[in-house]
Image (spheres, helix red, strand yellow):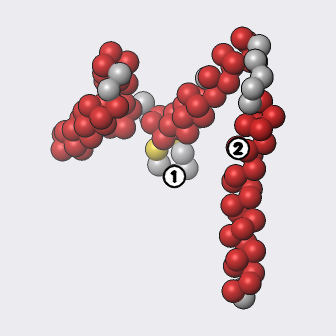
Amino acid sequence: MLEKEYIILIIGMGLVTYLPRLIPLLVLSGRNLPKWLSEGLDIIPVAILSAILLPLLVTSGEPKRIEFFQPELLVAIPTFIFALKTRSLSLTIVLGMLLFWIASKLM
């Protein structure tokens, strides 16, 4: 590719990334959303994170197969409970890393 094409590609990728965030912000700012819509929008990050993490936690191998007793899932459960109780991101990360290190040594 030529240098000009790279610049156009980078600008295009920036627009594709930025516009989906900007348009709702401009359209919805200053408006009162219905409670049901606001509550629905609040759970989107959790739903996306769950959709990304669940396959990583319960599948392994090639081809993928369900496997519940793998270190990732066994570490994720107590880490998740700790996160719910403490609401501390930094302590949760440290605990998760520590538990994963211990699990990797034991398995």
| Above or below, 24 relative to 15 | above
Q: Residues within 10 Å of mark 1 (few under 14, many from 20)?
A: few
Q: Which residue is the site of mark 1?
A: 62
Circle on res. 9: none
**Residue at (74, 30) in percent of width and height:** 29
- Out of 72 and 79, give the one closest to the viewer: 79
**Residue at (55, 50) in percent of width and height:** 63
- Report the side of 97 relative to 51 (left or right): left
Is residue 77 visible in the rendered structure shown here? no
Is residue 4 visible in the rendered structure shown here? yes
* Percent position of residue 23, x then y: 78, 42
- Are discs 2 and 1 less than 8 Å apart at CB? no
Q: Residues within 10 Å of mark 2 (few under 14, many from 20)?
A: few
Q: Could you tell me which secondary element the residue under label 2 belongs to?
A: helix
Observer-side mark, 2 or 1, equals 2
**Image-quadrant location for residue 40:** top right
Image quadrant occupied by the C terminus: top left
- Report the side of 80 relative to 95 (left or right): right
Circle on res. 21: 2
* Percent position of residue 38, x then y: 69, 18
Image quadrant occupied by the N terminus: bottom right
